[in-house]
Amino acid sequence: MSSSSFTKINDILSSLHTQAVEVDLANSKNKSFSLRKDNPVFSETLFSTNSDKLSHYVDEIRKKTDELASLIKAKKVQFSYARLALIEQQISAIKNAINANSSQNKASKQHIQMLKNKKYRQAAQSFIQPTQSLYQKLSETHEFERRLLDMLEQKQLEFSQATKNTKDKVSDELLVLHQRLGRCRQAISKLERQIEMSEKR
């Protein structure tokens, strides 16, 4: 891995850290964030960090990047590929979390408002609950999109290293993943339209 590649990763992490700090600061001032406060943003299978602040997860990736440099220097190729794949997954996850933060706070705000306005609970539930369900589905579909992108990256790496005999098989698997990603993004667009229509009612 060239020094320019490390520079690119570090530039991405610097940008992500700036965005993450801004999101963390905005969340700390947002009452609707209270529903998610003190809960980890990501699962333990993806990050060892346990925090409600995105910037802490970027710090973990920076440490992983330092470890990657040491692995490459020690010429531990297989470990280097595994660490690089994890770093890419983590960066993708944080990007998705930053993009989804506003929607999550909006859904939380609606939920808090519903609880406060007990007098109008029944009327509010008929609007808020379906919308929250749509936001939940949207979040889950975005997560599925992220996993598909991770699988595509890994499969593309596998394709670049495949022998002549296995390239056709890997190529077919890549095509299937691209088709699944296309359907997933269609589902995301549909959910976004449903949310927009629901909020206009």
Image: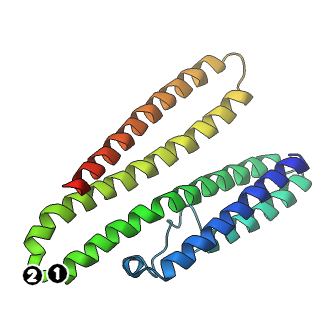
Residue bearing the label numbered 1: 117
Between 178 and 162, the one lying in front of the other is 178
Residue at point 29%, 52% (across, down): 195
Image height check: is 151 above or below 61? Answer: above
Q: What residue type is labelled 1?
A: Asn
Q: Residue 198 location, x and y as percent?
A: 22, 53
Residue at point 71%, 16% (across, down): 164
Residue bearing the label numbered 2: 119
Disc 2 versus disc 1: distance between alpha carbons? 5 Å
Residue at point 91%, 55% (across, down): 73
Total numbered labels: 2
Q: Residue 42 location, x and y as percent?
A: 51, 66
- The image's mark for residue 84 is none
The answer to whether 83 appears left or right of 168 in the picture is: right
Q: Residue 154 location, x and y as percent?
A: 63, 39
Q: Describe the colour scheme in one phrase.
A: rainbow
Give the farthest residue toward the front. Answer: 200
Q: Is mark 2 on a helix, strand or loop?
A: helix
Please identify the quadrant where the C terminus is shown.
Answer: bottom left
Residue 99 visible, this orientation? yes
Q: Residues within 10 Å of mark 1 (few under 14, many from 20)?
A: few
Image height check: is 7 above or below 191? Answer: below
Residue at point 40%, 69% (across, down): 105
Q: Which amino acid does label 2 sit on?
A: Lys
The answer to whether 4 appears left or right of 96 in the picture is: right
Residue 48 visible, this orientation? no
Q: Circles 2 and 1: CB distance less than 8 Å? A: yes
